[in-house]
Amino acid sequence: PVAPDDPRLEGVLEQLTRAQLFLREAQSSSDPTDRFRRLIAAVYFARAGVEIMLEAATMEVVKVDRHNLEVKLVSQLPYYHLIERLRIHDFHRFGLLLRDALVFQGPARFRGGPGGGSLALTPEGPKVSTAGTTELVERRPITLKNDQVFDEGSNSFVSVEQVVASFIGALPAAIECFKGL
């Protein structure tokens, strides 16, 4: 098991504390833009705790490899992949902003031989149509509508607050599991 004074465990717990702080601040904010910004900040710290745990598996500090730890975390943390996408899009790709418009951020492209394809943004989410041998190749795209994000798992839009609060709410149990590995 991970020792209680292991710096990785302390780091994971610190990231959880930061994520909880930003979530509380977001929930108490009446300004929609401020609220959104604080929710996205909470994403960073929540995901940072996960990254520390995954890195511990890579460094063989725990008795499970990175892949199997991630499988375990995916099963314990709601919206695991959506949190990852939010962080990647905010930090590495475009930056996430609160907008009134429906926005799709890729990368995504159509590939293949004869045929064609289309990607339509609808109030119910992105709709893809292909013909022939054409396929849509996506690399963790994200679709946002105001303060909601499209969740492929439920095939619907969910509030960023719901995503963040659910993920952070489940982190303590995931950390307990990590401590026992």
Image (cartoon, rainbow, N blue to C red):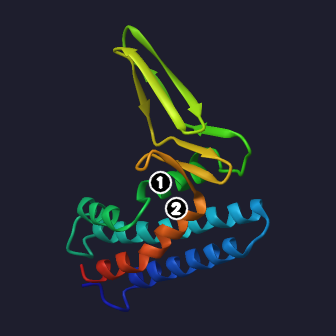
**Can see residue 163?**
yes
Residue on which disc 1 sits: 82
Q: Residues within 10 Å of mark 2 (few under 14, many from 20)?
A: many
- The residue at the point 35 percent across, 91 percent down is 4
Q: Nearer the viewer, residue 10 or 129?
A: 129
Question: Could you say where residue 91 lies in the image, as x and y percent from the top left?
Answer: 59, 53
Q: With respect to residue 82, does 16 lie above or below?
A: below
**Can see residue 107?**
no
Q: Are marks 1 and 2 in contact (CB under 8 Å)?
A: yes
Question: Could you say where residue 121 lies in the image, as x and y percent from the top left?
Answer: 58, 32
Q: Secondary structure at mark 2?
A: helix
Q: With respect to residue 140, does 44 lie above or below?
A: below
Q: Tell me how many marks there are.
A: 2
Mark 1 to mark 2: distance in Å? 8 Å
Viewed as shown, does residue 71 lie left or right of 119? left
Q: Residues within 10 Å of mark 1 (few under 14, many from 20)?
A: many
| Quarter of the image where one finds residue 49 | bottom left
| Quarter of the image where one finds residue 64 | bottom left
Question: Could you say where residue 44 lies in the image, as x and y percent from the top left?
Answer: 56, 65
- Label 2 amino acid? Val
Viewed as shown, does residue 74 lie left or right of 60? right
Residue furthest to the left: 63
Q: Earlier in the sequence, mark 1 or mark 2?
A: 1
- The residue at the point 54 percent across, 65 percent down is 164
- The residue at the point 25 percent across, 75 percent down is 62
Q: With respect to residue 146, does 118 lie above or below?
A: above
For the C terminus, which image quadrant?
bottom left
Q: Nearer the viewer, residue 74 or 149?
A: 149
Image disc number at residue 163 = 2
Residue furthest to the top: 114
